[in-house]
Image: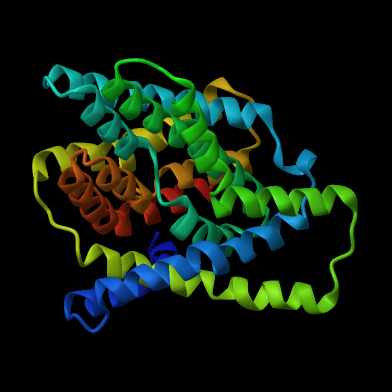
């Protein structure tokens, strides 16, 4: 356990460095926004393209894996939604709380950290988790919030969802990489080295950006944020572990990657959505802050456990 903690510590030290830079105003919110944009649209996209272009769809796509993750995540999503509705919250706020309970920071934290700690074989499983999060639950929250406000489903909502997926650089880079892999097109050496160089900036850039963005977050509504952090860091990986190891026939290594991905703290893009629609941004902010701080310990514990099998 101590060895695992020491291996994960540098990742969280980079987050802490970003947080300190943001709190002292050495790194302004505007600078953080531009760094995040660089990582999101360039560095992380290059990393994902390079990974996916060296994989075939057959290597990545595992329906047992998808069903295990999707079913377990849905259970926790429904639980968080029911708890929110019993507190007399509107559907819009319940949807945001449910999103906090199941959507982890797979893109900025999970991909760089899990690939380095669990090996190159983690690439495929992490991409599947990311795809389910973005395509299924990323679409669901937009449908629930927009549909609830409009009072009905409309083609406009579906168009908004589809456009959002098409404009997401992570989805685009993975898809392009798989298309290159499927076509057996050789990637010129300078292009491959360019992607490797640009992708190498994803890990430090993403972790620093996470920390700097946390500096603007506040710990309001601590009780609710604590419950949502408990859902994300404990209930979600536990449900995924039961589904992957006891119900569905998932390869033990892939199951370990899936469980660890489920144990990651609340993703920053949930705050972006909450702020965009004006639905409980302070609550999401507190959930991100608390879950990220606690995950320094919980993620290390989960990695130590999954590496045992």
In front of the other: 242 or 78:
78
Q: In which quarter of the image is the N terminus?
A: bottom left
* Residue drawn at the location 64% of the way across and 26% of the way down: 64
Say above or below: 52 vs 8.
above
Q: In this view, does 180 lie to the left or right of 200?
A: right
Left or right side of 79 for 155 = right
Q: Residue at x 57, y 57 (%)?
A: 118
Please say if 264 is above or below 244. below
Position of 118 with respect to 205 (left or right) is right
Residue that protrudes farthest toward the bottom in the picture = 26
Image mark count:
0
Q: Where is residue 3 in the image (x, y as percent from the top left)?
A: 43, 66
Residue drawn at the location 47% of the way across and 46% of the way down: 261
Q: In the drawing, does residue 199 fall left or right of residue 24?
A: right
Observer-nearest residue: 211 or 34?
34
Q: Nearer the viewer, residue 244 or 22?
A: 22
Among the 4 quarters of the image, the one containing residue 138: top left
Give the x, y percent position of residue 225: 17, 42
Location of the C terminus (image quadrant) = top right
Residue at image coords 57%, 52%: 170
Colour mode of the rendering: rainbow
Q: Where is residue 281 in the image (x, y as percent from the top left)?
A: 20, 46
Q: Position of residue 232 (x, y in %)?
A: 32, 40
Q: Please say if 134 is above or below 115.
A: above
Which of the two residues, 303 or 288, is positioned nearer the viewer here? 288
Question: Is there any visible trace of residue 7 in the rendered image?
Answer: no
The answer to whether residue 127 is visible is yes
């Amino acid at each position: 356990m101590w060895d695992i903690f020491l291996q994960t510590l540098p990742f969280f030290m980079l987050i802490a460095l970003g947080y300190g830079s943001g709190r002292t105003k050495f790194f302004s919110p505007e600078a953080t926004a531009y760094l995040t944009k660089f990582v999101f649209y360039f560095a992380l996209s290059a990393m994902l393209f390079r990974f996916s272009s060296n994989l075939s769809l057959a290597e990545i796509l595992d329906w047992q894996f998808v069903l295990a993750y999707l079913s377990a995540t849905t259970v926790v999503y429904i639980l968080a939604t029911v708890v929110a509705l019993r507190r007399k919250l509107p559907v819009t706020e319940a949807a945001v709380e449910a999103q906090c309970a199941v959507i982890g920071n797979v893109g900025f934290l999970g991909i760089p950290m899990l690939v380095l700690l669990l090996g190159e074989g983690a690439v495929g499983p992490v991409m599947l988790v990311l795809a389910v999060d973005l395509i299924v639950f990323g679409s669901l929250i937009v449908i629930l919030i927009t549909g609830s406000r409009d009072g009905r489903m409309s083609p406009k909502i579906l168009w908004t969802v589809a456009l959002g997926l098409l404009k997401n650089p992570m989805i685009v880079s993975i898809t392009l990489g798989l298309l290159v892999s499927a076509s057996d097109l050789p990637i010129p050496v300078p292009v491959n080295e360019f992607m490797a160089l640009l992708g190498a900036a994803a890990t430090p850039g993403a972790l620093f950006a996470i920390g700097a963005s946390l500096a603007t977050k506040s710990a309001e509504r601590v009780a609710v944020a604590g419950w949502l952090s408990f859902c994300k860091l404990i209930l979600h990986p536990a449900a995924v572990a039961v589904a992957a190891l006891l119900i569905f026939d998932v390869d033990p290594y892939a199951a370990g990657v899936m469980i660890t991905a489920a144990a990651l703290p609340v993703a920053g893009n949930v705050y972006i959505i909450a702020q965009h629609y004006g639905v409980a941004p302070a609550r999401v902010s507190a959930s991100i802050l608390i879950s990220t701080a606690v995950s320094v310990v919980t993620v290390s514990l989960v990695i130590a456990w999954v590496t045992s099998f």
